[in-house]
Amino acid sequence: MKALIALEDGRIFEGRSFTGEGEVFGEIVFNTSMTGYQEILTDPSYKGQMVTMTYPLIGNYGINEEDNESSSIHMGAFIVREYQDFYSNWRAKRSLADFLKHHNVLGIDQVDTRALTRHIRLAGAKKAVISTKDLDPESLIKKAQDSPGLIGRNLVKEVTCDAPYIVEKVDDSRRYIKRYIKVDDKKAKIVKEKGIKIAVIDCGLKLNQLRIFTAFGCKCHIFPANSSAQDIMSIDPDGIFLSNGPGDPAALTETISTVRSLLGRRPIFGICLGHQILSLALGAKTYKLKFGHRGGNQPVKNLKTGRIEITAQNHGFAVDQDSLPSDVEVTYINLNDSTVEGICHEGIKAFSVQYHPENAPGPHDAQYLFEQFIDIILEECRV
């Protein structure tokens, strides 16, 4: 089924829908990961966006039951060069097309993804419309121009949980999980004995973050993003975790205010959007990147050790380094564009990173940050 991709700047790309008819709008972005499309599809941070994969062959290992990072697909459309319907993998249970159809998400292939990616890199991420119903280029360009962008939009309210809940163990049948989550068993035993509680502010939480915390013996209390500081402190947590999520961080005034009220009361760790929220709560500003960082191969420099870490990333906004208060230390930078990739405030035991140390998908270089957070909690522990 023929499909047209129309960008707000007038550029048109042709493709084919392999999931049936539909029409959807959103910001069009690209991801440079070679594998991990199931985790990318189920990442809530992609709400409001349509994702182009730069790797040309997608679908060849199908979809399994264990690798979802949330209960749904959150992006509006999935764009690839070549879709492979005949998957082959011992863990696969169904095809990528079936998975997309089940969640009512458009899958588009036979697109010149190299040209599309190059255009985004030169012109920046754009509002776009994909349609199999309306094949009039002028009509689609107008729809793209009239569609809402990401700036100023609170998309977190569309992906956060509806009510608080508790997770002590993530049900996971993956036989290889211990290979990817390295846990100090002695430390995990101490954490379990002390009953360490993590208050998780869910802005678009990924499941592997909970896998890692619970593998270390933590009890996770997950709260909706609009929860108050009083709600969170009511469980007397030992640490507070700010998750990743979609959209413009500056639009999350309620969550920023809550985090500002929590500063210094418990150790805080933030990832991706959580990093931006913590920075805003500390008084910094954020801005929109030209085309963002999305993929599993972003080089980041640890300014404390001088080491280079390869990281998984998914964000379209960044923290303005010049706006950070003087008592906030920049701990990591992106080696591609020197943007801020991590901050730390030693005085209030708060730190965050822009990238995804929980991988899923991606490299495991930075997973030590979860243990670092737990070490801080144990040092501060009041139990």
Image (spheres, rainbow, N blue to C red):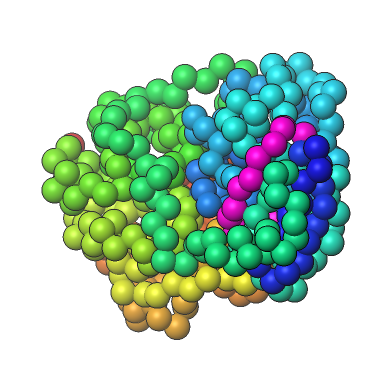
Q: Count the marks: how many? A: 0
Compared with 148, 76 (above or below) is above
The answer to whether 206 appears left or right of 63 in the picture is: left
Q: Position of residue 204 (x, y in %)?
A: 43, 44
The quarter of the picture where the N terminus appears is top right
Residue 191, quarter of the rendered image: top left
Q: Position of residue 105 (x, y in %)?
A: 62, 37
Q: Position of residue 137 (x, y in %)?
A: 75, 60
* Residue 64 in sight here: yes
Residue shown at 72% from the left, 64% from the top: 138
The answer to whether 109 appears left or right of 244 in the picture is: right
Q: Is residue 217 magenta?
A: no
The quarter of the picture where the C terminus appears is top left
Residue shown at 26% from the left, 34% from the top: 164
Compared with 118, 164 (above or below) is above
Q: Position of residue 178 (x, y in %)?
A: 57, 26
The answer to whether 34 appears left or right of 219 in the picture is: right
The answer to whether 297 appears left or right of 185 in the picture is: right
Part of the protein shown in magenta: 18-34
Q: Is residue 30 magenta?
A: yes
Residue shown at 49% from the left, 30% from the top: 71
Compared with 119, 81 (above or below) is above
Residue shown at 63% from the left, 65% from the top: 142
* Residue 314 in sight here: no
